[in-house]
Amino acid sequence: MDKKNLFEKIISKKEFSDLPKEDVKLVFQKFDKPEYLDEEKLKLTRDLLRKMYTVFLSGKLLNFKSKEPFWFLSKHLSTRERLSFYPELYKKIFQFTEGEWILFDLGSGVNGFSSFFFPKKNLKLKYLGIEAVGQLIEIQNKFFHGNKNFEFFHESLFDLEKIKTLFKKEKGKKIVFLFKVLDSLEMLKKDYSKTFLTEISPLADLFVVSFATRSILSKKKFFVERRWIYDFLDKNFLVLNKFELGNEEYTIFSKKDL
Ligand SMILES: C[S@@+](CC[C@H](N)C(=O)[O-])C[C@H]1O[C@@H](n2cnc3c(N)ncnc32)[C@H](O)[C@@H]1O
């Protein structure tokens, strides 16, 4: 099969049909090697794409009708696991923000629906969600249609220039969420998280990263230290709080001179 046909076949599955084409190409390139048969290239590419982008989704999310925010939150593994922890989580995060802030939720999944948990007192937030799975952008765009405080962008975090342009367009104090997304980036490009944080940190003020502490499927606890990222954060940023809540480990940090 030629490359074009193989590529078309990879994205013929609904779950991969609306990913940024550049991301699919990057993953495909990893396996486009002489030692693999076409079927193996297809399978390996789809397996990695699933791990990076769609394993968290319930199929129902891609075939939704009109539903309530809690329904959406319960159909994505990350937001479902976090449902009973959102009030405490947002209390911990938004104690550092007051007044007007712009929130960039990177690799947002359906986390825009958790805005119903944002504190209302002393805080005016504009929410921008950036996500590679086009269907998730579409769902949230439809739901928040007409609300100027919400915008969603179908972009890849591997396209650093585009992400930086989105940041530069917004004037004001910025907070960045990277909830359970750095591991996905690292699956394709080792140490990309560090490059990414180094590049966007001059454009924002406050950051929250999180990592899963349990396997998504078996729910078994991981025993990983992630020194590679925590040493980097300690060295380059001011860590304001680090805590475990639910099945996640969060770090809130700012630039050293906030
Ligand atoms: C584990 S989910 C977490 C979703 C959300 N941050 C949350 O915690 O509720 C990881 C998300 O990152 C997205 N993602 C992974 N790599 C990405 C990339 N290169 N660009 C944009 N989004 C990406 C996936 O599609 C998926 O929705």
Image (cartoon, rainbow, N blue to C red):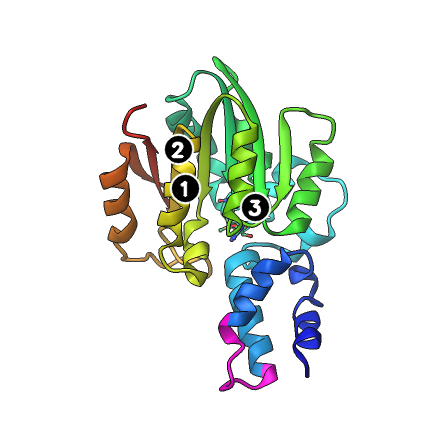
Disc number placed over residue 202 in the picture, else none: 2
Mark 3 Cβ inside 8 Å of ligand 1: yes
- The residue at the point 57 percent across, 33 percent down is 128
When asked about the image quadrant of residue 148, the answer is top right
Q: Position of residue 82 (x, y in %)?
A: 47, 41
In front of the other: label 3 or label 2? 2
Sequence order check: which comes first, mark 3 or mark 1?
A: 3
Sequence order check: which comes first, mark 3 or mark 2?
A: 3
Question: Can residue 210 be seen by looking at this rendering?
Answer: yes
User: Magenta segment, which residues?
Assistant: 30-39
User: Is residue 36 a member of the stretch shown in magenta?
Assistant: yes
When asked about the image quadrant of residue 236, the answer is top left
Q: How many marks?
A: 3
Determine which residue is flagged by label 1: 199
User: Is residue 257 a member of the stretch shown in magenta?
Assistant: no
The type of residue carrying mark 2 is Pro
Crowding at mark 3 (Cα within 10 Å: few <14, some 14-19, many 20+) = many
Mark 2 Cβ inside 8 Å of ligand 1: no
Q: Position of residue 134 (x, y in %)?
A: 66, 50
Determine which residue is flagged by label 3: 109
Looking at the rendered structure, the secondary structure element under dot 3 is: loop
Asked if the residue at tag 1 contacts the one at tag 2, i.e. Cβ–Cβ closer than 8 Å, the answer is yes
